[in-house]
Image (spheres, rainbow, N blue to C red):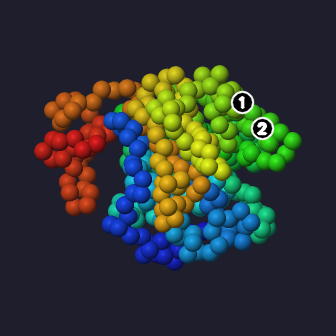
């Protein structure tokens, strides 16, 4: 289904550009040059007749889109890894259009993966994971792949490499949505274990870069076998590393981590922080768009040391002027300064 001008205008007209304020504290992930957000979007579909759609009509869809866009912008996301969205090449465009409209510049775009699923109304299970990114900060490298050759989990487990434009450093970002807990004989555990096994095997053979970050709704807590298998394969849970009390989901009053940020050893060295943004578990109805909180990871790829003021930055670094909200800034090597040389991020 193609996006159209009417839908875009409805989104643009309904956005409150200056009225939105965060209902939860913005997580501190240190002095990061890149900020990566992962989010389960809770059945973000335009097929409103589908039994698992989170929206019943266009108005509800537009409202949810605006909530998502504002949350990602509040986190200053450079890359968004998102799951539980409709399986087609147009769905992420609604969020991107809203983000660009609010931000005031067309800096956000998304990866088209050619994944489609067709199902009758009321029986729509065609979900996927995907990527949104700032084209002025990063560039996708290579193809968008999966540990699975076909089928449901081919769309739900995805792997994509990115290059930071200012440093040309690369990393691999895997966004995943493992099998949900179910009422079957083993509660879906065997499939989740398979998901982890396939993912580990595929990532062992990636050639785009050695630095790997695994994110997504893995539908397993830290002490469960799928996560333990990832840990045994060399991936460290970054949320627990930076906050032992972290949680991303509340089930019947019990808090736990279902949405993970796991890095191999070389990637972990470049992580400046990993925290949970509690916009959905604590933000209230006017802000909530999912039953899962957003996960934010800060990265300094290459572990390059940055100066504290303009004079400390090498003159060989890429320099460009940017205009935001009528104010002129200077960007050098991924950092932003006022024209007087004060670093603002």
State whether residue 192 appears in this view: yes
- Residue 22 found in image quarter: bottom left
In the rendered structure, the answer to whether residue 194 lies left or right of residue 283 reads right
Identify the residue shown where x is 33% and y is 36%. 31
Report the disc number at residue 151: none
- Residue 344 found in image quarter: top left
Report the disc number at residue 189: 2
Q: Residue furthest left?
A: 340
Identify the residue shown where x is 48% and y is 76%. 10
**Marks 1 and 2: in contact by CB < 8 Å?**
yes
Kind of element beneath mark 2 = helix
**Residue 319: percent from the left, percent from the top?**
25, 41
| Neighbourhood count class around disc 2 (C-alpha, 10 Å): few under 14, some 14–19, many 20 upward | many
**Residue 232: percent from the left, percent from the top?**
65, 22
| Neighbourhood count class around disc 1 (C-alpha, 10 Å): few under 14, some 14–19, many 20 upward | some
Residue 43 vertical position relative to residue 313 in the rendered view, above or below: below
Identify the residue shown where x is 24% and y is 56%. 323
In the rendered structure, the answer to whether residue 32 lies left or right of residue 234 reads left
Nearer to me, 307 or 220: 220
Q: Earlier in the sequence, mark 2 or mark 1?
A: 2
Identify the residue shown where x is 60% and y is 41%. 256
Residue 96 vertical position relative to residue 225 in the rendered view, above or below: below
Report the disc number at residue 225: 1
């Amino acid at each position: 289904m193609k996006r159209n001008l009417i839908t875009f205008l409805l989104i643009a007209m309904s956005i409150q550009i200056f009225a939105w304020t965060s209902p939860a504290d913005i997580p501190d992930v240190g002095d990061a040059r890149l900020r990566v957000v992962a989010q389960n979007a809770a059945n973000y579909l335009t097929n409103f007749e589908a039994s698992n759609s989170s929206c019943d009509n266009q108005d509800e869809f537009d409202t949810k889109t605006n909530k998502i866009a504002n949350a990602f912008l509040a986190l200053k996301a450079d890359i968004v890894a998102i799951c539980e969205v409709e399986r087609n090449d147009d769905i992420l465009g609604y969020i991107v259009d809203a983000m660009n409209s609010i931000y005031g510049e067309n800096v956000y775009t998304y990866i088209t993966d050619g994944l489609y699923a067709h199902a009758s109304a009321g029986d729509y299970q065609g979900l996927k994971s995907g990527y949104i990114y700032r084209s002025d900060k990063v560039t996708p490298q290579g193809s968008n792949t999966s540990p699975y050759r076909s089928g449901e989990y081919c769309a739900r487990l995805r792997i994509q490499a990115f290059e930071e434009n200012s440093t040309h450093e690369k990393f691999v970002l895997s966004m995943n949505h493992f099998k949900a807990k179910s009422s079957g004989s083993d509660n879906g555990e065997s499939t989740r274990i398979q998901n982890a096994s396939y993912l580990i095997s595929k990532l062992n053979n990636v050639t785009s870069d050695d630095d790997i970050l695994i994110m997504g709704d893995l539908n397993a807590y830290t002490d469960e076998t799928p996560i333990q298998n990832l840990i045994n394969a060399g991936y460290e849970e970054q949320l627990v590393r930076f906050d032992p009390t972290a949680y991303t989901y509340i089930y019947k009053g019990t808090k736990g981590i279902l949405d993970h940020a796991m890095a191999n050893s070389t990637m972990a060295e470049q992580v400046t922080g990993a925290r949970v943004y509690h916009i959905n578990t604590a933000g209230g109805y006017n802000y909530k768009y999912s039953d899962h909180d957003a996960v934010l990871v800060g990265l300094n790829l290459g572990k390059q040391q940055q100066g504290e003021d303009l004079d400390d930055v090498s003159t060989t670094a890429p320099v460009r002027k940017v205009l935001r909200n009528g104010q002129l800034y200077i960007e050098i090597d991924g950092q932003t300064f006022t024209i007087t040389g004060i670093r603002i991020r």
